[in-house]
Image (cartoon, rainbow, N blue to C red):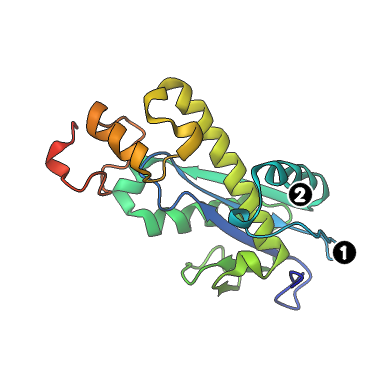
Amino acid sequence: MALLTNFSTYSTECGTDEAGRGCLAGPVTAAAVLLPDHFKNDILNDSKQVSHVNRSILRTIIEKNSLDFAFCHIMPDEIDSINILNASIKAMQLSVLKLKPQPEFIIVDGNRFKPCNNIPFETIIKGDSKYLSIAAASIIAKTYRDEYMQRIHEEYPMYNWKQNKGYPTKEHRNAIAKYGITKYHRKSFKLLPDQSKLNF
């Protein structure tokens, strides 16, 4: 099914989404994208449904053809301080606030958001597979977060973040058990089944 262009009747509507919410390490990253009404793309979809190669291609297309785009990282210490839900929402809000022009309406992937600069909004479950602007935001958030995880992989290669991107894979959990945690791990998350084994 083709993704839809707009949810509202406002002339400028942005989509926003986040990546990395379920990870044990690294930031939660959000993006917001303003697309022109005429924008079409047959392969654009939720970033989880798009191959790595196509995500890179799509990011270039989105950055070239969008009216504007922005992204924001919220780091692990702040995630631990305000919790992952609030961090995800804050990252989306900050991304929206960077857009020029400011959108007249916001569509948000998921079911939770908070008012942002008095701009009306709508939350849409699985919105990244329904609306082009949310799908575009998911691509931007995912690719910029992956790049960040690739960089910090060079600092701590034993966790293999270039592959698992900080998600709770068996490999990642085994590395935490063996090496302890880093400044990039989210201490408020259950990093291992037996937390007493962790080296803080």
- Asked if 15 appears above or below 192 in the picture, the reply is below
Q: Which of the 4 image quadrants contains residue 86?
A: bottom left
Marker disc for residue 107:
none
Q: Which of the 4 image quadrants contains residue 88?
A: bottom left
Instruction: Sort mark 1 into few (<14), some (14-19) or many (20+) by Cα contacts within 10 Å.
Output: few
Q: Which of the 4 image quadrants contains residue 103?
A: bottom right
- Asked if 75 appears above or below 43 in the picture, the reply is above
Cα distance in 3D space between marks 1 and 2: 13 Å
- Asked if 134 appears above or below 26 in the picture, the reply is below
Looking at the picture, how far across and down is residue 130, in whole percent? Answer: 67, 70
**Marks 2 and 1: in contact by CB < 8 Å?**
no
Q: Which residue is depicted at the point 53% across and 54% down?
A: 18
- Asked if 20 appears above or below 151 in the picture, the reply is below
Among the two numbered marks 1 and 2 on one chain, the one whose residue lies closer to the N terminus: 1
The foreground one among 173 and 112 is 173
For label 1, the residue is 38
For the C terminus, the image quarter is top left
Kind of residue at badge 2:
Ile
Looking at the picture, how far across and down is residue 21, in whole percent? Answer: 43, 53
Observer able to see residue 32: no
For label 2, the residue is 62
Q: Which residue is depicted at the point 30% across and 39% down?
A: 173
Label 1's element?
Answer: loop
Kind of residue at badge 1:
His
Instruction: Sort mark 2 into few (<14), some (14-19) or many (20+) by Cα contacts within 10 Å.
Output: many
Label 2's element?
Answer: helix
Left or right? Give the position of 86 relative to 12. left
Observer able to see residue 189: yes
Q: Which residue is depicted at the point 45% across and 33% down?
A: 161
Left or right? Give the position of 46 relative to 63. left
Return the residue found at the far bottom: 9
